[in-house]
Image (cartoon, rainbow, N blue to C red):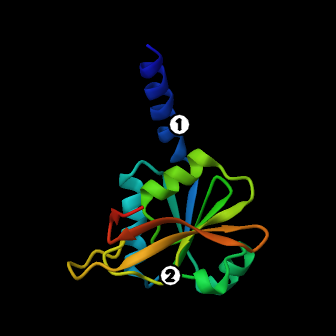
Amino acid sequence: MKKFAFLALSLCATLALGADMKVYKSPTCGCCGNWASAMQKAGFSEETIKVDDLVKVKKEFHVPLELSSCHTAIVDGYVIEGHVPADEVKRLLELKPKDAVGIAVPGMPMESQGMEQGGKAEQYDVILFKKDGSQEVFATYIGTKKLK
């Protein structure tokens, strides 16, 4: 019975995750739209906001330059920068680290979520970045496959 209650609560928490994701992207970027669609398929309700000045958005939300990518999303007060896999967004929202600004996938790794082109998958890290400026590896992937 306890296992069922835990699973039910986990499902409710996952469903509740999808309420407030805002995705800031360039009007001309196709891969950003692909990523936003992947977030919707993962259960997030997202609103896309097309902006001409993404640098201003990244500064407003304290995204370090070295972690920048082609789009910035905000969900539950956390910054999601770039092609972060949906599972890692969910994990961030489950863990709710108090000292975190958000998580990022710098650049645009081939075959990452939203960047699927049928080519050779690149290895990349999902980086947790904190209010004190420190950073740590949150997860490692090759394409959409999690390594650690």
Label 1 sits on what residue type? Answer: Ala
Label 2 sits on what residue type? Answer: Cys
Residue identifier under label 1: 13
Give the residue displayed 75% in from the left and 74% down from the top: 133
Give the residue displayed 53% in from the left and 40% down from the top: 16
Give me the C-alpha separation between circle 2 and circle 1.
29 Å
Q: Residues within 10 Å of mark 1 (few under 14, many from 20)?
A: some
Residue 96, compared with residue 119, is above or below; it is above
- Position of 129 with respect to 38 (left or right) is right
* Pick the front one: 58 or 135: 135
> Would you say residue 24 is visible in this rendering?
no
At mark 2, the secondary structure is loop
Label whose residue precedes the other's in the sequence (2 or 1): 1
* Pick the front one: 51 or 65: 65
User: What is the x, y in percent for residue 98?
Assistant: 73, 53
Residue identifier under label 2: 70
User: What is the x, y in percent for residue 99?
Assistant: 75, 58
Seen as rendered, the residue at the extreme front is 148
User: What is the x, y in percent for residue 141?
Assistant: 38, 68
Give the residue displayed 22% in from the left and 82% down from the top: 119
Give the residue displayed 50% in from the left and 81% down from the top: 70
